[in-house]
Amino acid sequence: MDSIYGTALLLWLSASLRIISAWPQPAIKAQIRQDSSQLSADEYDYVIVGGGTSGLTVGDRLTVDGKFTVLVLEYGYFDTSVGMNPRRMFNITSEPSPGLNNRTFRVGVGCVVGGSSTVNGQVFLRGSKLEYDAWKELSGPNSTIRYNTKYWSKDAKIYATFGGKPQPLMKNLFSAISKMPGMTVPEDSGAGEAGLYWYPISQDNVNFQRSSARTGHWEGLNRSNYEMIVGAKPNKINFDGDRAISVQYISRNDSSTPPVTIKARKHVILAAGSIHTPQDLPGVRSNFQDHSYIPNIAYSWGTTPNGIFVPRPWCSMMPPNLAAMIGMPVSYTKELIEGYKQQQHVYAKLFRKKNNLHPLSRGTILPDPDDIDKEMKVDYRASSNTLDTRVVIEIIKFMRRYMTQSDLKIYNATEMLPGAEMQSDEELMGWARGIIIPSVYHPAGTELGVHGVRGLSVVDASIMPTLVGATTSMTVYAIAEKAAGMIKAKTK
Ligand SMILES: Cc1cc2nc3c(=O)[nH]c(=O)nc-3n(C[C@H](O)[C@H](O)[C@H](O)COP(=O)(O)OP(=O)(O)OC[C@H]3O[C@@H](n4cnc5c(N)ncnc54)[C@H](O)[C@@H]3O)c2cc1C
């Protein structure tokens, strides 16, 4: 018997987690260095820590006119295959989550040139205008943040495609959801609105190959002013007063080699991602957020609808955004409490709109107190605010209405998970705590306080004050494009 697994947003996200391994080998002309003896200098205009999604985007933009030199310090290695392979991922296990029956989880982060954009699920969603407006509100009156499609235009060098026509079953599911009460259906890709829509994936539309920061912002660039050293582990940013002036790194695999210091004439740029950028900066990291999800709410069809679903990477569907989350940070400072109040204020507005994929629990990313060089301690603290779990329960109830009261009711589906016997909120809450996964690999918002520091910028996913109710790579590309423009203007 065919079955359908529904999890609000993440049903279709998981269908898109497809690995494209037959990437054609391009001519690689940019300058990859394996060790420091191969570097052309010991000072550069810009030093970028992290050659991932944001780091390579910024590096490309800063080197394009040939006026400035850039060195990228990347912890991972160059690898032309793509997809979620342990070889290209950090090996991190989270702290136990008390709100989720003390379970621990693998923390997914790319560890390779191109970063998470080379291992991700390629679901390519932007946030909504309202969410970027919320950032503006949180960032103060002088903020220039706004929803701006120019960052995803043809110049972006990152490609997206809808692939092919949706399969009949997907059309069926789409049609039934679109008639659910309160559902809105903006144009394809959302166009800055929340609701139900078909969304693209980050692949080119000719060969349907992954489009990543590596393919868009590194490969094929023939620039002597753009270098990257791989297998480098930055362990110190040096300051002259309040100004960042250089970065020290050691070899990732050979701790016997002496540390190397690279001077940044203009600017140090941190782009090591939400989990590792906090390692490089002092301060509390208590604004950590990720999207939680339920891996399976399962139904068996009574009568099988037309068009069996055969997952294909180019056939994707955007379900309604119904998940959300809340919770106070662990380490309380006056500023954190004030910041969190402001976040709740903007969330209160967003909750009244369509997009509720906003986690309200807050986790931490902290260095190991016994050894600062060890891997960061990642504590999701997911569902530490019970409102998050309550939203999950609303998702289960939504799925029940969808399967039994919408156009799909003619197929007489039987609920397999959590199962019809689970009726009360308490029963559903207990079930959900045992099954929720606290991450869909969208770490963001680690509260980086670089105020009062000159010559240093953070350009990666960690700068999102609140997580967008969408996958994150499109937003990271836009952040990096904007950051590159700002850094250029500030340091010319
Ligand atoms: C498995 C997975 C699936 C995902 N699925 C999707 C999806 O379907 N759609 C979507 O839009 N988003 C998805 N994401 C999220 C998205 O890819 C990320 O939000 C985005 O790529 C983050 O960009 P970044 O620049 O912040 O970090 P990254 O792209 O991760 O770049 C950080 C880089 O820094 C390097 N680095 C780390 N520590 C150090 C250090 N100490 N020194 C030097 N270098 C360091 C890393 O090796 C990496 O290359 C997924 C992520 C993962 C991991």
Image (tube, rainbow, N blue to C red):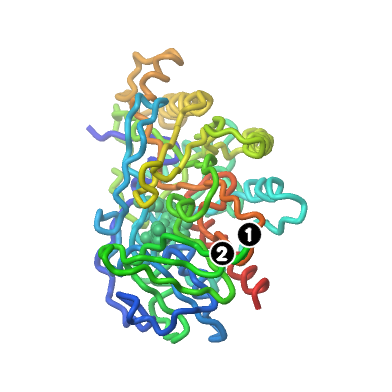
Helix, strand or loop under label 1? loop
Camera-side residue: 24 or 380? 380
Q: Is residue 201 visible?
A: no
Which residue type carries mark 1?
Val
* Residue 270 position in % (x across, y down): 50, 61
Q: Is residue 211 left or right of residue 394?
A: left
Q: Position of residue 441 (x, y in %)?
A: 40, 47
Q: Looking at the image, which is closer to me, 376 or 209?
A: 376
Residue type, label 2? Phe
Relative to 230, is 242 on the left or the right?
A: right
- Name the residue at the left extreme: 1
* The quarter of the displayed image where residue 457 is located: bottom right
Q: Which residue is mark 2?
A: 239
Tag 1: Cα neighbours inside 10 Å, few (<14), some, or many (≥20)? few
Image disc number at residue 179: none
Residue 404, compared with residue 421, is above or below; it is below
Q: Are marks 2 and 1 in contact (CB under 8 Å)?
A: yes
* Mark 1 lies on residue: 453
Q: Earlier in the sequence, mark 2 or mark 1?
A: 2
Counting from the top left corner in percent of width and height, residue 223 is at: 45, 85
Which residue is at the front of the view, 361 or 294? 361
Image quadrant holding the N terminus, namely: top left
Which residue is painted at 37% across and 15% down in the image?
Answer: 422
Q: Ligand 1, what quadrant? A: bottom left
Q: Secondary structure at mark 2?
A: strand
